[in-house]
C-alpha cells in the first residue's frame, strides 16, 4: 500500500458559549481544527485531526496545512503508511517542532494501519486494559454562581468527577470552588486546573485553602517555566499535582520525574507528536512511580477516537484514579463524524471497527469547513 495524496480540511464547530471554558490562560470560545486525509492506492483513507490552538502550541490551521503540504507530504507520498514509526522519525527529521501537526498525520497513519489489518487501533496497541475510559467534566472559570450552575448541570448529565478552572484570581478562585462544591455535594470528585496562572507562593497558599473543599488534584498550579517551581509547590501541598502545560516531550516527562515535580502527567494525542509519543510518556511515568491521564484541547471526533484508543490500551494511564478529558459532545453543537462516538457522562468507548473506527460525514464536513 502506498500513500498517493495528502488532503487537509480546516474546520470549526461552534462551541456552546454558556459552557465554553475560561481559565488561567484565556477563554476557549472558538475551536479550530485541521482534518487530515491520507489517500492510498488501495482505496483506504486514513483520518487524522490537528488541534490548531495557537495559545497552546504556536500552530494554527494555516501553519498546519502549510507544514503538511510543504514538508510532510513529500515524505509521505509514495511511502507505505503501515511503517508508522519510520515515517514519524522521518517527520521529525524534516520538520522541527509543530508537534500537533505531526500528531494529526501520525493519527492518520495508525488509522490506515488498523484498516489495513482489520483491527481497531486499541487492539494493535496491545489490546484493552480497561472496559471503558472513565472521563470527567471541566467547569469554566466563571463567576461562582455561574460555575456552580454549570457544575450542577454536569451532575445532572451523570458526571461523578469534574475539575474547575482556577488560576485567575485567588479570592475568586476560592469562591468559585466553594460554590461548585456546595452545588455538587460531597460525593462528586472535584479537582482544580490553574493552567499555570498562579505564582509559586500564591499557588501554595491558595491550594492549602482549597483543600477545605475536598479537592483531589491540582493541575498545572504554576507556569511551565522551570520544573523547580512545580516541585516546590508539590512539596508544600497535600494533594497530587498534575503536569499539563509543563509536559510536551518525553524529555519534559523525564525532567518532571527527576525533579519530583508532579504526581500525574497529562498526555494529549497532540503533545510530543502523537499516540506513540504519548505511550512512551506513559511508560516513563510507570518507571518513575507516577501515573497519567488524558488531557484535551476539546478535540472533535477523529482525535477523540484516538484519545479513547490510547487510553483503552495504555496501562500507564490511570484513568480510573484520574479520569480523562474526552468531552467534545458536551461542548460542541455538532461534530464531523458519520456515527457519533460512544461518549457519555463519565465514560468513553471506542467504536469496534478497524483503525480509529470513525468515518467523516461529508455534509457535516462541508457545513463546518472554514476555508
Ligand atoms: Mg489543563
Image (cartoon, helix red, strand yellow):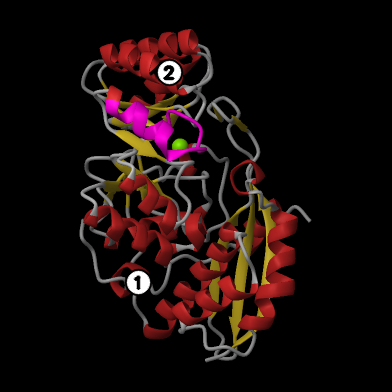
Look at 28% across and 23% down and name the residue there.
237
Q: Nearer the viewer, residue 201 or 214?
A: 201
Residue 145 in view here:
no
Tell which quarter ligand 1 is in: top left
Residue 158 screen position, x and y as percent:
31, 32
Q: The C terminus lies in which quarter of the figure?
A: bottom right
Residue 105 screen position, x and y as percent:
56, 69
Q: Residues within 10 Å of mark 1 (few under 14, many from 20)?
A: many
Asked whether, in this view, residue 125 is left or right of residue 94, the answer is left
User: Vertical placement of 76 versus 100: above or below?
Assistant: below
**What residue is pinned by disc 1?**
120
Residue 227 in view here:
yes
Look at 51% across and 74% down and name the residue there.
88
User: Vertical placement of 103 versus 146: above or below?
Assistant: below
Residue 280 screen position, x and y as percent:
35, 63
- Mark seen at residue 53: none
User: Vertical placement of 30 versus 281: above or below?
Assistant: above
Task: Determine whether the residue tagged by mark 1 lies in a helix, strand or loop.
Answer: loop
Q: Nearer the viewer, residue 305 or 177?
A: 177
Residue 330 screen position, x and y as percent:
47, 37
User: Vertical placement of 292 versus 345: above or below?
Assistant: below
Q: Earlier in the sequence, mark 1 or mark 2?
A: 1
**What residue is pinned by disc 2?**
201
Q: Nearer the viewer, residue 254 or 3?
A: 254
**Over which residues does the magenta segment extend?**
220-235
**Viewer-side label of 1, 2:** 2
Look at 43% across and 67% down and name the residue there.
356
Q: Residues within 10 Å of mark 2 (few under 14, many from 20)?
A: few
Amino acid at each position: 500500500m502506498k500513500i498517493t495524496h495528502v488532503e487537509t480540511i480546516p474546520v470549526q464547530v461552534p462551541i456552546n458559549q454558556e459552557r465554553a471554558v475560561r481559565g488561567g490562560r484565556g477563554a476557549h470560545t472558538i475551536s479550530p481544527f485541521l482534518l487530515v486525509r491520507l489517500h492510498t492506492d488501495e482505496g483506504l483513507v486514513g483520518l487524522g485531526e490537528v488541534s490548531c490552538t495557537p495559545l497552546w502550541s504556536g500552530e494554527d490551521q494555516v501553519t498546519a496545512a502549510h507544514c503538511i503540504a510543504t514538508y510532510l507530504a513529500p515524505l509521505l507520498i509514495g511511502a507505505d503508511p503501515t511503517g508508522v514509526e519510520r515515517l514519524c522519525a522521518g517527520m521529525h527529521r524534516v520538520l522541527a517542532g509543530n508537534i500537533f501537526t505531526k500528531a494529526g498525520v501520525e493519527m492518520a497513519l495508525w488509522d490506515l494501519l488498523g484498516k489495513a489489518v482489520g483491527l481497531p487501533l486499541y487492539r494493535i496497541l496491545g489490546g484493552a486494559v480497561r472496559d471503558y475510559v472513565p472521563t470527567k467534566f471541566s467547569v469554566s472559570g466563571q463567576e461562582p454562581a455561574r460555575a456552580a450552575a454549570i457544575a450542577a448541570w454536569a451532575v445532572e448529565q451523570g458526571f461523578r468527577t469534574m475539575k474547575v478552572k482556577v488560576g485567575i484570581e485567588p479570592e475568586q478562585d476560592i469562591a468559585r470552588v466553594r460554590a461548585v462544591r456546595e452545588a455538587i455535594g460531597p460525593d462528586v470528585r472535584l479537582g482544580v486546573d490553574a493552567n499555570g496562572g498562579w505564582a509559586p507562593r500564591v499557588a501554595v497558599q491558595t491550594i492549602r485553602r482549597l483543600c477545605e473543599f475536598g479537592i483531589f488534584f491540582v493541575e498545572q498550579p504554576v507556569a511551565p517555566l522551570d520544573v523547580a517551581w512545580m516541585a516546590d509547590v508539590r512539596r508544600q501541598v497535600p494533594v497530587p499535582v498534575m503536569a499539563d502545560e509543563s509536559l510536551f516531550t518525553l524529555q519534559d516527562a523525564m525532567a518532571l520525574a527527576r525533579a519530583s515535580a508532579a504526581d500525574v502527567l497529562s498526555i494529549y494525542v497532540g503533545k510530543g507528536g502523537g499516540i506513540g509519543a504519548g505511550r512512551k510518556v506513559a511508560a516513563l511515568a510507570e518507571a518513575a512511580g507516577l501515573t497519567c491521564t488524558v488531557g484535551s484541547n476539546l478535540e472533535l471526533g477523529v482525535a477523540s477516537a484516538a484519545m479513547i484508543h490510547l487510553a483503552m490500551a495504555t496501562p500507564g494511564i490511570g484513568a480510573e484514579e484520574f479520569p480523562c478529558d474526552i468531552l467534545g459532545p458536551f461542548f460542541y453543537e455538532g461534530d464531523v463524524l458519520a456515527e457519533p462516538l460512544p461518549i457519555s457522562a463519565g465514560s468513553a468507548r471506542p467504536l469496534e471497527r478497524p483503525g480509529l473506527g470513525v468515518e467523516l460525514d461529508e455534509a457535516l464536513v462541508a457545513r463546518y469547513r472554514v476555508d
